[in-house]
Amino acid sequence: MVSLSRASKVAAILAVSGLGLGACSAHPGTAAIIGDWSVSEAELDLSSQQLSALMGQQVDAAQFLPDMSSSRAVGQVAEENGVTVSDEEVMQQFQQMGERVVARGGQSTPVKEPTPFLKTIVKDTLALQKLRSMGFSSEKSQELSNQISQIMQSTKVEINPRYGTYNAQSNELTQTVFGDVVRSSSAARQAGQN
């Protein structure tokens, strides 16, 4: 005979799993949609694998999902102000990240073909660095900050509940109680399909 508390836990896990699988039924297999940009669960999983190998430690790429709205806004404002970041610069940044890990005594596996998700994160980060180095006046800097804020506020962000609950006001992702269980289950299923 199964105890009531154990049955409750099993029911909760099944309910959360069901929510995680059914919540994105309009976009199955999607980890996040930021404006008109979409990130699949498979791409997010591969991004985690690539980052983990590069950094020599386990990295969950889902932690970057809440920042994608600001990242994309920075990229857009940078582009509008003539800032470009080449693919070569992006790949150099990955190489430098790996070199820093090795210099600290860690092991790093180079990323030869980064996912579009990882490329976008690095590209937008480099664009922000370039914007900051342009020596804008405080008025222009404030204007750019306002543009970034406006783009972020007008960009719809949807994150699959299996990665947590997204709060648009704080731009934070709160992990669900069973989020790790659902993600592990999803990763195991995908590994079995490959």
Image (cartoon, rainbow, N blue to C red):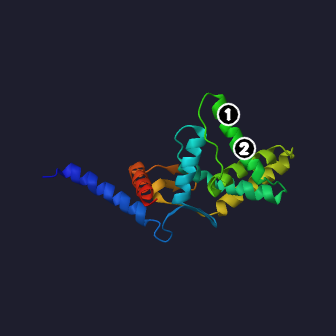
Q: Is residue 22 above or below residue 77?
A: below
Q: Secondary structure at mark 1?
A: helix
Q: Is residue 12 above or below residue 97?
A: below
- State the image quarter where residue 186 is shown: bottom left
Write the residue at 59% across / 31% down: 106
How many marks the image carries: the answer is: 2
Q: Amino acid at mark 1?
A: Arg
Give the image location of residue 131, x and y in percent: 80, 48
Q: Earlier in the sequence, mark 2 or mark 1?
A: 2
Give the image location of residue 120, x and y in percent: 68, 54
> Which mark, by number, is residue 100?
1
> Could you tell whether 78 is left or right of 183 in the image?
right
> Could you tell whether 8 is left or right of 184 in the image?
left
Give the image location of residue 170, x and y in percent: 57, 50
> Which mark, by number, is residue 93?
2
Give the image location of residue 43, x and y in percent: 56, 57
Residue 13 showing in the rendered view:
yes
